[in-house]
Image (cartoon, coloured by chain):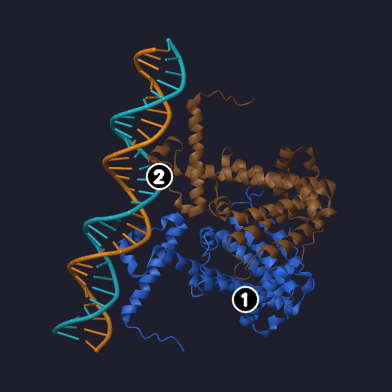
Chain colours: A blue, B brown, C cyan, D orange
Amino acid sequence: MSTEVPVGRRERVRAATVDEIKAVALRLLVEEGQEAATLRAIAREMGMTAPGLYRYFPSHEDLHKALVADTYDRITAVLAQARDGAEAAQATEPMLAAKPLVVVQLVCVAKAFRDWAAAHPQEFRLVFGSPVPALAQDAEDPALAAGNRFGALFTEIFLRLWAEYPFPVDPDDALPEALAVQLRDYRAVLVELFGEGAAALPLGAIDVYLRAWVQLYGLVAMDVFNHLHFCLSDAGPFFETSLAAIGRSLGIVYVPEK
Amino acid sequence: MSTEVPVGRRERVRAATVDEIKAVALRLLVEEGQEAATLRAIAREMGMTAPGLYRYFPSHEDLHKALVADTYDRITAVLAQARDGAEAAQATEPMLAAKPLVVVQLVCVAKAFRDWAAAHPQEFRLVFGSPVPALAQDAEDPALAAGNRFGALFTEIFLRLWAEYPFPVDPDDALPEALAVQLRDYRAVLVELFGEGAAALPLGAIDVYLRAWVQLYGLVAMDVFNHLHFCLSDAGPFFETSLAAIGRSLGIVYVPEK
DNA sequence: GCCGTAAGCAAACACTGTTAACTCCTGCGA
DNA sequence: TCGCAGGAGTTAACAGTGTTTGCTTACGGC
């Protein structure tokens, strides 16, 4: 089952080159902007020529997708770290001391997400910006898979939150039927991913959860994309009150520090 | 005060050409995608050559900005129409019949925004996609001005909603001070734009209003950018329950049809 | 030690935005 | 009505883009 990694040095240096290409491309993208990461610039930086890169990536777009996947994984790792550092945060911030661990984890991850986005706007654009794989539901698209892993990190915490501290939601039949069928399908996916525990989720809870995610995304995206500049010079404090509002919708009491 | 429009036919045909360029560029952008709207393609479509376009736009980017501004204005017009058709909607949809006019207007405009975005994804990307003017707070940037007019349409309705049906909010001093100062500045802008009536707005109301806008944006953007496809095949019904949630935060009772 | 294969390169193609120099036509002022 | 300035539009060219083709070279596995 384990993927055989026999490999003579041939494919070892090859893998190293692939990594270098991605590293250089990412650096250019971050430091000089999206459109500066041209094949010739990357190659030049590496002391080679553009067509050589085609030995490693079939097209510029594929390289781009690889960067997206990698970035997804990097941010997922950052968020996982924030989640696992929740206890430590509890010790530091008095605000969080009295709260259940899973609540603290959710808050820490949400904050880490915003902090990462604020610190890495170019990479946030790369991953969450307009150009979406669209109909590329290839399933084997590594960027899509990485995106799913990213989402799963949030979902896993939410499922634990619900298991430990369920909040009141409307009954299933209060939802529009057209939405209910979609949420049932998605719940089946969750069962697939997280086990039978998810089967007991009320559809209303999923509805609320998705809305929380939409709010978090909207908040961070508008900040990074400067769409809040018309009213706020620094979205940080506004993120705090918004986090409190999102928490409220999930039955969490979170009071931002003043 | 009225801008003198003397103009011999010289500048009349010039204006017509400018309009044609923008129309062709927009059509290409909508039908063939963002990157198909190249100068040569536009010129070819018009029976001329690319350098000729430089008589009308100093660069491709300026043409792009002009399209953004025009699109802002177009969508603003659509939303204004939806707002002004609120009474008619009240007569049609029983759900809205009993509600105050200003509430119906808000619902109609929000729905019209989503509908427009769903029907014009390319144009939505053009305006709300990642590439933001950034630090281009030129003030005389027509795209920025158009964006402000767009936002003002929402804000005007909100101000009337607040005047007629204020909802309970936290007192000003419950907000983090770092946020309060920004909201005070923004309130001053609102007073500038909408008159002294806005001066009485509690900061908490602005906080809630901004969050409602962030939610609406996040919802529509994630839909258009396909970021909801991992859980929803059609975001329409989810938009309804989200609209209800947003309304609730504004003290509005809106029950989506089942 | 050979040899096949992978790596990398130079040249070229079809594009892109943009500039310079030129021609032509036309609407305006006298 | 005429002459002409200036605007409109052209061709040619430059520097850049992603990508393909054919070639050489060097090295790792047999």
**Total label count?**
2
Indicate the position of residue A88 as horizontal and vertical percent values.
65, 74
| Residue for point 65% across, 84% down | A195
Q: Is mark 2 on a helix, strand or loop?
A: helix
- Would you place residue A70 above or below residue B197 in this image? below
> Which quadrant would the N terminus of chain B be assigned to in this image?
top right
Query: Callout 2, which amino acid?
Result: Arg
Q: Nearer the viewer, mark 1 or mark 2?
A: 2
Query: Callout 1, which amino acid?
Result: Asp
| Residue for point 64% across, 58% down | B220
Asked if one can make out residue A85 in the rendered structure from this viewpoint, the answer is: no
Asked if one can make out residue B64 in the rendered structure from this viewpoint, the answer is: yes
Residue located beneath label 2 in the image: B44
Most foreground residue, A144 or A70: A144
Q: Which image quadrant is residue B68 in?
A: top right
Left or right: where does residue A173 sit relative to residue B153? right
- Would you place residue C12 above or below residue B14 in this image? below
Chain of the residue where label 2 is placed in the rendered structure: B
Residue located beneath label 1 in the image: A84
Left or right: where does residue B246 sit relative to residue D17? right
Chain of the residue where label 1 is placed in the rendered structure: A
Indicate the position of residue A149 as horizontal and vertical percent values.
56, 74
Indicate the position of residue A164 as horizontal and vertical percent values.
74, 79
